[in-house]
Image (cartoon, grey):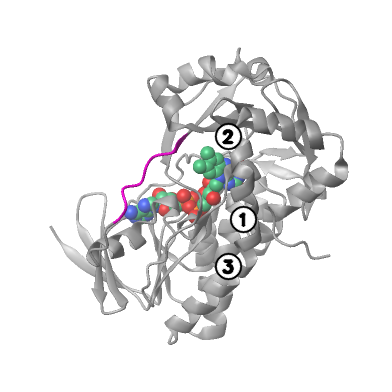
Amino acid sequence: MTSKTVKSDVLIVGAGVAGCGLAIRLARAGLDTAVIDKDKFPRHKLCGEFVSPECIAELESLGVMESIEAIGGDRIRETVFHSLRGRSVTVPSDYFSNGSQGAIGVSRSGMDHQLIKGASNAGAEIFEEMRASDIELDGSNVKRVIAKDAIGDHIRFESQLFVDATGRSRVLGNLVDRKNEKQRKRQQIGHVAFKAHFRDVVLQKGVCEIYFFEGGYGGLSFVEDGAANHCFLIDAGVVRNNGGDPDLLLKNVIFENRKAKEALISADRTMEWMAVAIPGFGKQRTSGIDNLIAVGDSRAFIDPFTGSGMLMALESGQLLASAVERGGLHHVREIRDLYSSEHSKATRKRLLTCRVMRRLAFSPTLSEAVIASIGSSRTLVERIASLTRPVRSH
Ligand SMILES: Cc1cc2nc3c(=O)[nH]c(=O)nc-3n(C[C@H](O)[C@H](O)[C@H](O)COP(=O)(O)OP(=O)(O)OC[C@H]3O[C@@H](n4cnc5c(N)ncnc54)[C@H](O)[C@@H]3O)c2cc1C
């Protein structure tokens, strides 16, 4: 087993939306930036694959919008929320910033591949199939991250600033907790998410549909090549009662929503189901380490019904890049504190709104009542939609 050392100014662990967005910005600013990811790209990713309209400006500023558009996804004009008993409410994409361009339905496999290429083109050094597996601390700083490559060799990564961009799994934060012997509370698995692509769904192009059902909700929208993404989030108890089988959940639970049944009953699944446990939502714990900063879902996970997780991931990369630019890498603690306060300011209201709305999303009775009461009021729908978003600048 060999062991080599890679040195950089910044090490980003995780080449998802947040990690690559940040890597592009830092590499462009002239910082020696290394990015590692456990996967080989392109790879599928569990996600609703609804790229909200506000992301377009972010992706343009990262220089990857053209290549993402060339993948050929769907331009989504509106999202229709369907209650279990057949009521609906429509949220046009132009209720959001940049909305006249619509949202984009595009696979994460295609989009993340373009982002990682963008990071490489900007000058970041990319290491695929490189899994962060250990961390070495020196007081209140990370000294190095140890990663394992595809053939099992260990590589040491040394940097001034370490970024946890590993998504909800918050890998570096958890490694630090383990080193500090912080007793992690055993997390209950509250929900499970599933995703697959289908052909021959009954759905209009340009429309994303969201279906509420017992214990959860799911979305359907087109991506590229005539395929549609069906992704759903459901109570872990309901999953157990159906033997953990997503096809059974579709038949027994999701098809209780008539619109979901119409759309999917004759469709063909074109890939294996992907599944992931979701222990919780909202802001994640911080590590307390001076030179370790979390971006994207590792920092905060916003509820999927908002279709804005990728937006928040891109925003967090932008906030951290600007804190690095202002603070300079020699002042990592200042960067961490500046980023932390800017991130809280930018996301607090959204995360709070989602905390309140979450109960509605998982209860068919409550979602029914809300859809019935707001369905015909454009002002109310627009107001509620905007509460899940950054403050709009005109
Ligand atoms: C059911 C569901 C539906 C969703 N639908 C939408 C939607 O329609 N629109 C939307 O905007 N958002 C949606 N989201 C949220 C969105 O997927 C996330 O907010 C977004 O992917 C966060 O990006 P990220 O870069 O922080 O993390 P991720 O995209 O999760 O990327 C993390 C990266 O870290 C890598 N990694 C993990 N562990 C290691 C390790 N040990 N070593 C090295 N690399 C590692 C992974 O391979 C991965 O590439 C949804 C989420 C769920 C659960």
In magenta, the rendered stretch is: 184-192
* Disc 2, SS: helix
List the residue tagged with mark 2: 362
- Relative to 3, 359 lies left or right: right
Residue drawn where x is 66% and y is 23% of the image: 84
Residue 24 numbered tag: none
Q: Residues within 10 Å of mark 1 (few under 14, many from 20)?
A: some
List the residue tagged with mark 3: 344
Whether residue 14 is situated above or below residue 288 in the rendered picture: above
Nearer the observer, 232 or 152:
232
Mark 2 and mark 1 residues within 8 Å of each other at the beta carbon: no
Determine if residue 50 is in view.
Answer: no
Residue drawn where x is 62% and y is 41% of the image: 305
- Quarter of the image with the N terminus is bottom left
The mark that comes first in sequence, 2 or 3, is 3
- Relative to 347, 176 lies left or right: left
* Disc 3, SS: helix
Q: Quadrant of residue 91?
A: top right
